[in-house]
Image (spheres, rainbow, N blue to C red):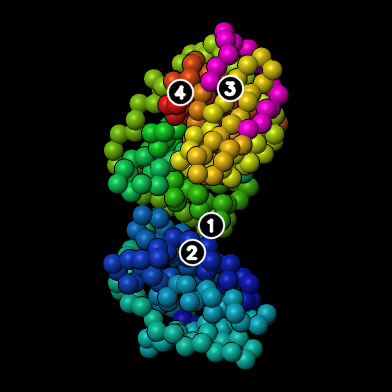
Amino acid sequence: MRIRAERDDLGDVFSRANRAVGTRSALPVLQGLKCEVSGSSLRVTGTDLEMTVQTQTEVETLQEGAAVIPGKILEQAVRKMPAGQVTIGAEDGDVEILGSGPRFSLKQLGLDDFPEISQTSLPGTEVDGEALAGAIAQVTTAASTDAARPILTGVLFESTEDGVRLVSTDSYRLAVRDLPGVGIEGSGLIPARGLRELPRTVGASKVQVSLDGREGVFSSDRGTLRLRMIEGTFPKYQSLLPDSYPNELIVDRGGLLEALGRVALVAEDHIPVRLKINTGGVEIAVSRQDVGAEKEFLEGAFSGTEELEIAFNPRYLSDGVSAISGGSVRLQLIDGLKPSVLDSADDPGFLYLLMPVRI
């Protein structure tokens, strides 16, 4: 194979495919990008077997063919070239990358060893790409990163009467996002790590989504993102969501985020932040014996049975407030020991449930 194209176009397509290439792999060939040239198109595939990115760009084809090239150095070598045309050729086990002056010579990886990746999928449902990316950003906040608990590292996609619901939890918090009017067929548990890559790989104004029971496939005119579903049963989260809460506090979202940012200077992750809630608003305080303390009052509208005190992990609380869009945040509480819910009237499709810390 041999092609010529603009440096920035090649750098973009290699960068997107490299999002699926793991930093470590027992199979050396998975450190590479499969580059296939046919007609005037360069198709690039990167995979770690759990996540696959297939993307393409138009090129000047000098010779059709295919090769597997070490992904990270290929991208970096192209980006280091002077602006303008870059030529890439692969022959007899070697890869040549030419700019207007510089020249790289790399060794190919085994083309026959690269896994076969399906090029087809079930007909998908077209959705608003920006809305989907926003929903994913909200719910992945609550997904676990603990590989020992794989089910909790995923986002549950499930059909509802009104559309589709996305749910994640790490057992300390729960995020639920409803997308009404989105008729995605099927359901499944899709890795949050891969979903976070959607905007940077195939994100577009319109995205096709299909769930076939084995993988979630997200396609646009920029390419295709394939994510192998996680096997297992997602926790029965519905029982954690009471029909109503007797206590409610509404505060300014920006002011609360700023206050939590100051609290974090003292608290770090392991010292709980205490909230004393009354009719005037909320007192936010943290104390750490070896460092000091921080305390401030934030005005708000409280309706409820009595003054309450509750404590949360400060990072988890801040994550939830950050995930909410709109100018205000509503905190709904039962008491100081039961899970509380964060949401907003400006963002009715999203809620974030958080377990309190005993104090």
- Please indicate whether residue 330 sits to the left or right of residue 273 in the image: right
- Amino acid residing under circle 1: Thr
First in sequence: mark 4 vs mark 3: 3
First in sequence: mark 3 vs mark 2: 2
Using the image as rendered, state which of residue 273 and residue 257 is in the foreground. Answer: 273
Cα–Cα span, label 1 and label 4: 36 Å
First in sequence: mark 2 vs mark 4: 2
Residue numbers of the magenta segment = 295-309
First in sequence: mark 1 vs mark 4: 1
**Residue at image point 46% right, 81% down:** 1
In percent of width and height, residue 92 lies at: 38, 88
Residue depth check, mark 1 versus mark 4: number of the one nearer the observer: 4
User: Element type at marker 1?
Assistant: helix
- Check if mark 1's residue and mark 3's residue have beta carbons within 8 Å: no
Residue assigned mark 4: 339
- Check if mark 2's residue and mark 1's residue have beta carbons within 8 Å: yes
Residue depth check, mark 3 versus mark 2: number of the one nearer the observer: 3
User: Element type at marker 4?
Assistant: loop
Disc number for residue 276:
3
**Residue at image point 36% right, 39% down:** 152
